[in-house]
Image (spheres, rainbow, N blue to C red):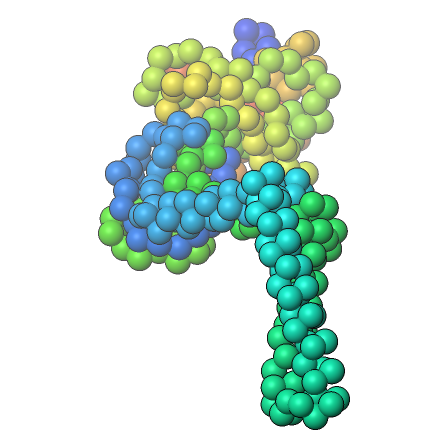
Amino acid sequence: MVKVQSFNKNVSDIDTRSFPGVVQPISETKLAFRVGGHLTHLKVSVGQRIKKGEVIARLDQRDFKVRVKRLSAAVDEARSKLSAMSIGARAEDIAMLKAELDAARSRLSESEVNFERYKSLYAEKAVARATYDSAKTGYETALSSVTAAQNALAKATKGSRKEDIAAMKARIKALKADLADARNALSDTELHAPFDGYVHEKFVENFESIEIGDPIISLLDMRFPEVRTRIPRYLIENRDLWGHISTIFENRDPKRYPSEIKEIGQMTQGPGQSFPLVLKVKIPSNMIVHPGTAVTVNINFNEQLSQNTSIIVPSSALFSLADGSSAVWRVNPDDMTITAIPVQTNEIKENGISITAEIQADDQIVTAGARF
């Protein structure tokens, strides 16, 4: 038996539309160390909430600290040498070099007198050639000692050569770069949370050997959880009438949390298909919302929608189209033919199901026997 009934607009339902949705994470990030080593600290568990900056894991730091200490000492030593090269020798060192030069000159004077004497005797064939050669060698050695003492005193007085100072500066620069790398490596032995979130998965356990880039955990970013729902075509066509959007989380207090549009899908299939809508929801920092949580998305409108109405019909009036969407039969009173009208189901009420559809006032809807 087929029943037909007329329905009027529910004005109170026109200004707000509600749609079921689900929470999805903004992003899932796999965290890894920039250095390798032996894992000594990993005390997080799956599902645990992590705050930004919190230490998630730590590698054995002993070798890294030794390298920092060794390079720091090398930099200090090189700086001391550069300072000495730049300012020259101390006064007591210069005094000692002057004394060494005076002694070398005294030895040279004696060697020169001795050499000249044996030179004359050798010319007169009064001494052997070996004696002459020994005197000559002694003189030349004394002369070299004076030259060396003079150079040492000059260097101490004037300081090191410019090229030697430049080379030491370059060495210090290289050592400082190595020290910075060592300190960064030491810092990288601790893995910190880059944002607030919670642990979705653990890939390693304590005391394992870790290579660079090995994933340690995956962290879900839930600072601004995303909600995905679907909306009918007529709301897309009346986008300029949208006002405040809010989200209610299932199994929580009925508070509505402000939501912003992230994206609206531009493609759909079939006359009854809906468009995807993704929202970013603003929640308190201490609130935890898990992906998969059911929500209700409420869209308020600045004006009443002119063509689409929300009415309450019995469940027997609904049937499914080939694409799986819901519809009702509208009766043409002139020839008693029927036309399938796609609808958006809203919520179940005491006297039926609230639907939204392109239905005019006093349209006749098949309310029984619709599934034929």
The single residue placed furthest to the top in the displayed view is: 12
Q: Nearer the viewer, residue 195 or 351?
A: 195
* Residue 86 in picture, x, y percent from top left: 67, 43
Q: Residue at x 46, y 13 (%)?
A: 256
The quadrant the N terminus occupies is top left
* Residue 303 in picture, x, y percent from top left: 68, 9
Q: Is residue 68 above or below residue 344?
A: below
Regarding residue 24, the answer to whether it shows in the image is no
Q: Nearer the viewer, residue 131 or 247?
A: 131
Regarding residue 88, the answer to whether it shows in the image is yes
Q: Is residue 71 above or below residue 198?
A: below
Query: How many marks on residues?
Result: 0
* Residue 365 in picture, x, y percent from top left: 54, 24
Viewed as shown, does residue 144 lie left or right of 225?
right
Q: Residue at x 74, y 82 (%)?
A: 120
In the picture, residue 218 is in which quadrant?
Answer: top left
Q: Nearer the viewer, residue 303 or 89?
A: 89
In the picture, residue 267 is in which quadrant?
Answer: top right
Q: Nearer the viewer, residue 179 or 275?
A: 179
Q: Residue at x 69, y 70 (%)?
A: 113
Q: Is residue 317 above or below residue 282?
A: below
* Residue 154 in picture, x, y percent from top left: 71, 51
Q: Residue at x 44, y 41 (%)?
A: 187
